[in-house]
Amino acid sequence: MKSLIDILDLSVEEIDSLLDTALDIIANPKKYSEVCHGKKLATLFFEPSTRTRLSFEAAMMELGGNVIGFSEASSSSASKGESVADTAKVISCYADIIAMRHPKEGAPLVASMNASIPVINAGDGGHNHPTQTLADLLTIKREKGHFDGLTVGFCGDLKFGRTVHSLINALSRYTGIKFVLISPDELKLPGYVIRDVIEKNGLPYLETRSLEEVMPELDILYMTRVQGERFFSEEEYLRLRDSYILDTEKLKSAKEDLVIMHPLPRVNEISVSVDRDPRACYFKQVLNGKFVRMALILKLLTEAGTI
């Protein structure tokens, strides 16, 4: 019985198939409106979430299914000391599929090893967030039509950003990808990601501190928040933070078909004036997340023989 814990659990062929299903859901919503009738998704969110939890719930409802669960650990038996393994066994008696977010890395993996139903990792600590990566991939697919040959820029916190690491993992399996890594020295992409993912796949990459210098060559710009708590000096943080605020001025040298992405929530790293730019796709990402989660729920329940 298959679960999704890490984006690398899926082959390139499986990802492409999921994206095709999501595109068909977008084109033919009525075809899918009752496919999960009578099925239940359990959303086990041991830490707060707005977008991800509601996206999973909306996805299941639009497939005709139902949702049970909780939105914080204090409202579950975890507050009494119940283990993740036992929770997974219990919920398997009530639901057909689980979406779990947990502050501890590896918790969804433990759940998947003990549940008798599929488990979807909805984020575990700073480790993995595979459905965000699928939302990112669907956004690129819808905006560009392909992955091969793209120059993808990641800007901001590349050290701690789990969405950045997961998307690099996924894109590295396509051909002709070039990565441009834009960050302060303090928040550079970890060496093991460069060594074990980018270099291992023989892909070109550039590390730089300047967004303006590389803007003209980017096909995709993936913005992230620079986190003040990572700096020793507030003065240094403020200087660097302000150097990565994307505004209409910085976009003047960008390609007309640039795709601007952000996993959200944003703080101040993208000016609200950019929201009106047709290249801004971060709210489209949110919508695409619902569609790709619908496709994933459908895939896992079909493979489990539930539907």
Image (cartoon, rainbow, N blue to C red):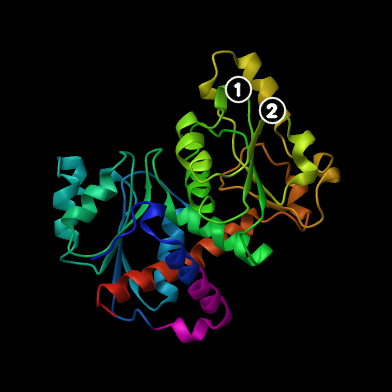
Q: State yes or no: residue 49 in magenta.
A: no
Regarding residue 201, the answer to whether it shows in the image is: yes
Above-or-below relation of 301 to 12: below
Position of 64 with respect to 231 (left or right) is left
Quarter of the image where the C terminus is located: bottom left
| Other residues around mark 1 within 10 Å, as few (<14) / some (14–19) / many (≥20) | few
Q: Main secondary structure of the magenta part?
A: helix
Circle 2 SS class: loop
Mark on residue 209? 2
Q: Are the residues tagged 2 and 1 within 8 Å (C-beta)? A: yes
Seen from the viewer's position, the closer of residues 63 and 297 is: 297
Q: What range is drawn magenta here?
A: 19-34
Circle 1 SS class: helix
Position of 259 with respect to 71 (left or right) is right
Where is residue 172 shown, x and y percent of the image?
53, 50
Above-or-below relation of 290 to 264: below
Mark 2 vs mark 1, CA separation in Å: 8 Å
Earlier residue among tags 2 and 1: 1
Query: Residue 114: which quarter of the image?
Result: bottom left
Q: Give the residue at mark 1.
A: 185
Quarter of the image where the N terminus is located: bottom left
Q: How many marks?
A: 2
Where is residue 267 shown, x and y percent of the image?
62, 38
Position of 214 with respect to 87 (left or right) is right
Disc 2 residue type (three-letter): Arg
Above-or-below relation of 272 to 91: above
Where is residue 123 shown, x and y percent of the image?
39, 47
